[in-house]
Amino acid sequence: GQVGLKVAIFTVAFAAMGFAMRAMTKTVMRAETQMLKLEAILKATGHAAGLTATDIENLSREIGIGTLASTQKVRDAAGMLLTFKSIAGDTFREALALTQDLAAVGFGDLKMGAMQLGKALEEPIVGLGALRRVGVSFIEDQKALIKVLDMTGRKAEAQKIILKALSEQVGGAGVKAATGLAGAWDTLVERFTIFIEDTKLGRAL
């Protein structure tokens, strides 16, 4: 009661500015840490995915802006998926997008989805059981064909069947969930976060 209105307003504004600057600093630090991790994983795996750090960043932003997932969480999921060396090129791109579709319909978070899907694509015979346990179903013909392809060294074809089956069950769920007001707000937040990460002004702030 003894503090004047102007002093109170200044104090609140100063505190808010400090909170905002702290949040922005954390955003930039987290982005740098994630990129360094991605580069380290790419190097450790001998760039088995056939993608560069820039490719993965662009894909992460595309998914982050187009769905309710954050770009930061997609980067983490991408890092997890990169550890599975047999997942490469378009298969990697499709798998990363499907991890958000899985998360959108309730199959855990992005990182968990990346781990489960990565295991299924890396070792199709073993991975099918893991996917079934979390609610993803495959018909008997699909399971039999996947096993035959994997056992005969045609893993890439087995991976395509797994991704196709997943796409038929959950494909597009992540994008569809982001078409309403929640999606518009999420897109605004994502673009502002990327602005802070990328621009000289954002980094200076």
Image (spheres, grey):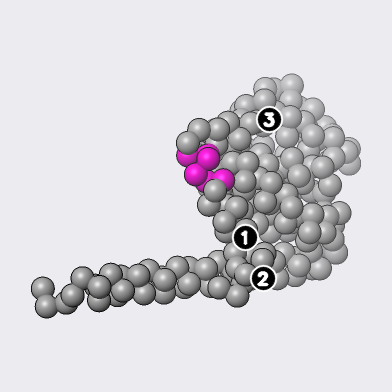
Residue 195, label in figure: 1
Question: Can see residue 136?
Answer: no
- What amino acid type is highlighted by mark number 2? Lys
**Mark 1 or mark 3, earlier in chain:** 3
Residue 85, x across and y down, in percent: 80, 55
Which residue corresponds to the image point at 49% horizontal and 44% vertical from the top-left? Answer: 185
Front residue of 90/20: it is: 20
Quadrant (top left/top right/bottom left/bottom right) for the C terminus: bottom right
- Tell me which residue sits at (57%, 56%) in the image: 192
Crowding near pointer 1: few (<14 within 10 Å), some, many (20+)?
some
x and y percentages locating residue 144 in the rendered image: 76, 27
In the picture, measured across the screen, residue 16 lies left or right of residue 101, that is left
Magenta segment range?
A: 182-187
Under mark 3, the amino acid is Ser
Secondary structure, mark 3, is helix
Instruction: Tell us which disc is closer to us: 1 or 3.
Output: 1
Q: Residue 184: within the magenta?
A: yes
Query: Crowding at label 2, few (<14), some or many (≥20) Cα neighbours within 10 Å?
Result: few
Dominant secondary structure of the residues highlighted in magenta in the image = helix
What distance separates the C-alpha of mark 1 from that of mark 3? Answer: 32 Å
At 82% from the left and 42% from the top, the residue drawn is 90
Which label belongs to residue 200? 2
- Whether residue 98 appears in magenta in the rendering, the answer is no
